[in-house]
């Protein structure tokens, strides 16, 4: 039934202001283009509005979820019973070699704005989808680099909207595809990132090179919807004869194990393993979250049987998760 008690909408509108939507399909707000409706949805464009939305959900005893750019996320076919607050705070300002960025800003937009200022440090990440806040939450990175190494501080609010504070980078305990926010959640409002002076032409060349690599090896999510790499790479120290390590991280990529298990092209419903990258799942039409979960479990079962390793999901799941273990075992 969800939280559709008469009067809830009026109370949310009073607290949040304009922009509140009811029964908003979340497939329109994720790069996977999968997911049922949220009972309530708002795109918060200021720190005050985002904080007010979280406080209102707490007061009304509504479950809430903070949404960034919608990448790295799979939403249940049943949607979300509560209030989804999309962080749409996207202001970007530069001060010398530092940038203060609203955590709802698009990551590539920030990288291109940095290039305009001839500021280097983020060109390697060109093409990583999603928001700056989402990148910080999961410490997104590639080629042996990550965003956490360039965070100076972040301004956050508690998920009940009760307290706003600015925390230094050390608080976040950044690690491989991980931060303290996963264990002690806060909503990211803005951040200060460290850059360095560079050559605009060289930065442009690196951005274009990284975008071209992604064009060749990765699906273009607007045409082939995807959440990006589905599984985390293996922990440091994992060894398997003949398997290469990822440059910079010295981790065996999950895609290498999945390739060894002949996972490219596997398909359940409209969920399919991308033909050029075994660790990327795409929505080949009208995939459901259940299709994706069944396919992912089948892939994990193959790797488990061949290597004795349990792959760990990098993509987050939102909402009620169906039981897919039996179907996956049969498929694998």
Image: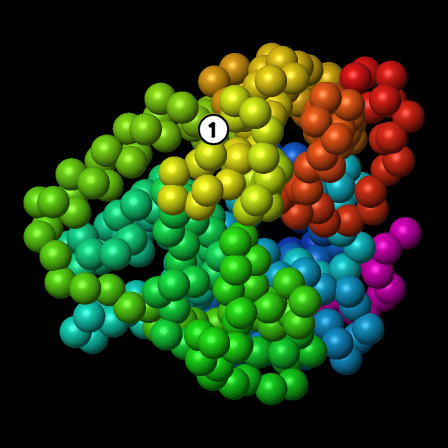
Q: Position of residue 197 (x, y in %)?
A: 13, 63
- When the figure is inspected, residue 227 is found, relative to residue 112, above or below; the finding is above
Q: How many marks?
A: 1
Residue 322 visible to the viewer: yes
Write the residue at 60% across / 18% down: 260
Write the residue at 12% across / 57% down: 198
Is residue 7 on the magenta stretch?
Answer: yes
Residues drawn in magenta: 1-15
- Towards the viewer: 225 or 184: 184
Q: Position of residue 191 (x, y in %)?
A: 40, 71
- Towards the viewer: 267 or 45: 267
**Could you say which quadrant of the image residue 49 lies in?**
bottom right
The colour scheme is rainbow
- Towards the viewer: 280 or 19: 280
Residue 117 visible to the viewer: no
In the rendered view, does 272 fall on the left or right side of 141? right
Q: Position of residue 144 (x, y in %)?
A: 39, 47
Is residue 14 on the magenta stretch?
Answer: yes
Q: Residues within 10 Å of mark 1 (few under 14, many from 20)?
A: some
In the rendered view, does 190 fall on the left or right side of 71? left
- For the C terminus, the image quarter is top right
Write the residue at 20% across / 56% down: 120
**Could you say which quadrant of the image residue 169 lies in?**
bottom left
Q: Position of residue 259 (x, y in %)?
A: 57, 19
In the rendered view, does 4 fall on the left or right side of 252? right
Give the labeled residue for mark 1.
244
């Amino acid at each position: 039934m969800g939280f559709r008690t008469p009067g809830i909408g009026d109370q949310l509108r009073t607290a949040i202001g304009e922009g509140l939507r009811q029964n908003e399909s979340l497939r329109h707000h994720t790069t996977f283009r999968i997911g049922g409706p949220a009972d309530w949805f708002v795109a918060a464009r200021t720190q005050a509005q985002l904080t007010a939305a979280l406080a209102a959900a707490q007061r009304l005893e509504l479950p809430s979820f903070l949404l960034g750019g919608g990448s790295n996320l799979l939403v249940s076919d049943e949607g979300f019973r509560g209030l989804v607050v999309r962080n749409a705070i996207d202001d970007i300002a530069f001060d010398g070699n530092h940038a203060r960025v609203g955590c709802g800003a698009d990551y590539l937009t920030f990288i291109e704005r940095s290039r305009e200022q001839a500021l280097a440090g983020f060109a390697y990440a060109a093409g990583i989808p999603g928001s700056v806040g989402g990148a910080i939450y999961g410490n997104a990175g590639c080629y042996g680099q990550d965003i956490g190494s360039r965070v100076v501080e972040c301004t956050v609010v508690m998920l009940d909207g009760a307290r706003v504070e600015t925390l230094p980078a050390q608080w976040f305990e950044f690690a491989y595809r991980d931060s303290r926010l996963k264990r002690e959640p806060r909503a990211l409002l803005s951040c200060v990132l460290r850059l360095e002076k560079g050559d605009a032409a060289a930065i442009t060349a690196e951005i274009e090179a990284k975008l071209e690599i992604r064009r060749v090896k990765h699906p273009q999510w607007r045409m082939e919807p995807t959440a990006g790499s589905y599984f985390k790479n293996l922990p440091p120290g994992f060894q398997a004869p003949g398997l290469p390590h990822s440059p910079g991280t010295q981790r065996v990529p999950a895609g290498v194990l999945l390739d060894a298990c002949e996972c490219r092209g596997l398909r359940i419903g409209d969920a399919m393993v991308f033909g050029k990258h075994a660790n990327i799942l795409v929505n080949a039409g009208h995939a459901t979250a259940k299709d994706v979960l069944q396919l992912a479990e089948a892939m994990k079962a193959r790797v488990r049987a061949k290597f004795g390793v349990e792959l760990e999901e990098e993509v987050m799941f939102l909402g009620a998760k169906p039981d897919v273990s039996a179907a996956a075992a049969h498929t694998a």
